[in-house]
Image: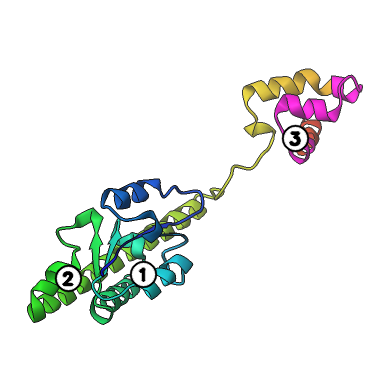
Amino acid sequence: MANVYGYIRVSTKEQNEQRQLNKMIDKGVEARRIFVDKASGKDFNRPQYQTLRRVLGEGDLVYIDALDRMGRNYDEVISEWKYITRELQADIIVLENETLFDSRKFREMGDMGRLMEDQFLSLLSYVADQERKKIRQRQAEGIAAAKAQNKHLGRPQLNVDTLSEEQRKILNDNYNRWKEKEITGVQFAALLNLKKNSFYKIVKQYEESTN
């Protein structure tokens, strides 16, 4: 008897898979037949995907929310798609666009359907590859532009000048109290909302600027 499965992938542990899970349940997929990976889509070395691959059989059906949930390396996506639909004789439906991504429709068309499926997947691979190149180019251009303008990439450097107006007032009002041991360093740092290392760095800069 054919089985219906669902495959879910989110890129990080912080991302929530609930939206994809709801879609699978709405399609009637049993919870025990839904496989979830929290991993990058750069390749298919994912434990739950590999388990799904092993249990799939002829006539089975796999639901995937979107093609990039299957993977982001589209040459490998095409290879996996063909393995599942042609070697295993199972089927795939991509919920994001069921009209186009339903392998059963290509199968029903016989040899002509296989030819159309090959062309469709090749076109998809080309478009995805071009998009990846554009993204990499935009990232490289952004980094180059930031470097050219002498911008710091990442968090702003903490110094006296980057303190808020309120923090600078607290620093001015309480510096002498701290030096005269009316308050401790821990208390002073808490007033400034700074961690220990940041506090001593700021105090040193403040002393240098006022001497």
At label 1, counting other C-alpha atoms closer than 10 Å, the crowd grade (few under 14, some 14-19, many 20 or more) is some
Q: CA distance from mark 3 to mark 2?
A: 60 Å
Q: Earlier in the sequence, mark 1 or mark 3?
A: 1
Q: Earlier in the sequence, mark 3 or mark 2?
A: 2
Q: CA distance from mark 1 to mark 3?
A: 47 Å
User: Residue tagged by mark 2?
Assistant: 120
Q: Quadrant of residue 8?
A: bottom left
**Closer-to-camera residue (16/150):** 16
Q: Which residues are magenta?
A: 177-200
Q: Quadrant of residue 66?
A: bottom left
Residue 70 percent coordinates (x, y): 34, 64
User: Residue tagged by mark 1?
Assistant: 73
Q: Residue at x 63, y 33 (%)?
A: 162
Per the image, is 142 magenta? no
Q: Colour scheme in the image? A: rainbow
User: Residue tagged by mark 3?
Assistant: 202
Q: Is residue 149 above or below residue 195?
A: below
- Is disc 2 in contact with disc 1, using a CB cutoff of under 8 Å? no
Q: Main secondary structure of the magenta part?
A: helix
Residue 18 appears left or right of 173: left
> Looking at the picture, which amino acid does disc 1 mark?
Asn
> Looking at the picture, which amino acid does disc 2 mark?
Phe
Q: Is disc 1 placed on a helix, strand or loop? A: loop
